[in-house]
Image: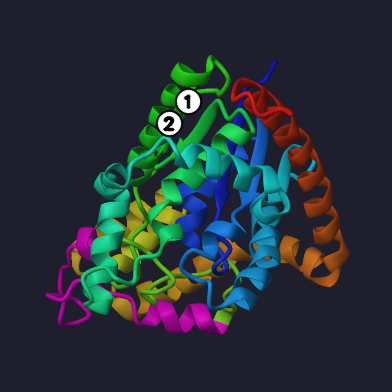
Amino acid sequence: MKKTILTGLRPTGNLHLGHYFGAGKTWCNIQNDYDFYLEIADVQALTDNFNNPEKVRTNVYEITKDLIAIGIDPNKVHFFIQSKIPEIAELTVFLSNLVTVSRLQRNPTVKSEIMQKKELFGNNGESITYGFLGYPVSQAADITCFDGEVVPVGDDQLPLLEQCREIVRKFNSIYGETLTEPEQLLSTTPRIKGLDGNEKMGKSLGNAIYLVDDEETIKQKIMNALTDPNKIRKDDPANPDICMVFYYHKLVNEENKIKTICSECKKGERGCVNCKKELIEAMNNFLKPIQERRKTYEDNPELVEQILTEGTKKAKEKAEETMKRVKKAMKIDY
């Protein structure tokens, strides 16, 4: 039998190239190998978007269309909406008894995000909500509710997965072997940089190319991308390793073309404007088939609704089985 894999995304905006190369491409490659549950994590999105529920609701459908467009097959992967599975919320409550506040605050991922919020709001963390701090517990419930045996993660998410394993071990030590302890499927793809050279491509940073961007938007973004600041004139030699235009050429161009660009850049035989124009063309060619597949679901929103309904039904059946087992172990199966 195939192992069960659980992963997901928060519906806070359309997918960008960082999502595709950092996770989506891997999901496409492994979807035949696992019993695959893909969570649209709307409840978790509300932890820091609670005052903008319409944004979250709209993006549930937007990112589902994006995921299908990149090649995630609904016939192989169970797409489901987190808020439609009340068993996750119920299990979150049970698991929350097994984790101290100090342990949550020590989680490196949570600690980093708390520091960001302190810097942003300048109020010593008073803006941190109970729901935000408890995110690792909620994530542990996501994974264990579906007996997730494998979880795809990047380096930055390893502390969250380790905390999930701690919770599982503690639960099983008290109530008997009930929950499945997940293993990691570590991503070998480095985090995709932003157009501005930032180590992270993100919505809030304004440095991302989205899968839904039209040709004019892509043109404007790439023409403003960071290049080698030491290249002043068109025929000056440059260092492609610090040029974001070359960085993106490597993502969407063929190997022979990349070698040519690199060589010409170092010799001063390539102007930045022409190099950007070539990238614009290559980027549009890369995104075109994704956008064409997406249009089918834009024109037929009932197909998206059907995919989410069927996937959520399957996920709920699985979650109900888990919770029967959990409640029996906890002696609350009245």
- Mark carried by residue 171: 1
The residue at the point 40 percent across, 64 percent down is 129
Q: Quadrant of residue 56?
A: bottom right
Kindly identify the amino acid type of the residue bearing the numbered disc 1. Phe
Q: Quadrant of residue 200?
A: bottom left
Quadrant location, the C terminus = top right
The residue at the point 39 percent across, 77 percent down is 206
Residue furthest toward the left? 230
- Which one is in front, 333 or 259? 333
The residue singled out by tag 2 in the image is 167
Q: Main secondary structure of the magenta part?
A: loop
In the rendered view, does 268 fall on the left or right side of 92?
left
Q: Residues within 10 Å of mark 2 (few under 14, many from 20)?
A: many
Judge whether 166 appears above or below 300 on screen.
Answer: above
In the rendered view, does 114 fall on the left or right side of 287?
left
Q: Residue 42 placed where, x, y %?
A: 61, 60
Q: Is residue 179 magenta?
A: no
- Mark carried by residue 308: none
- Which one is in front, 149 or 291? 149
- Secondary structure beneath disc 2? helix
What is the CA distance from the residue labelled 2 to the residue labelled 1? 6 Å
- Residue 34 in sight in this render: no
Magenta residue span: 216-243
- Secondary structure beneath disc 1? helix
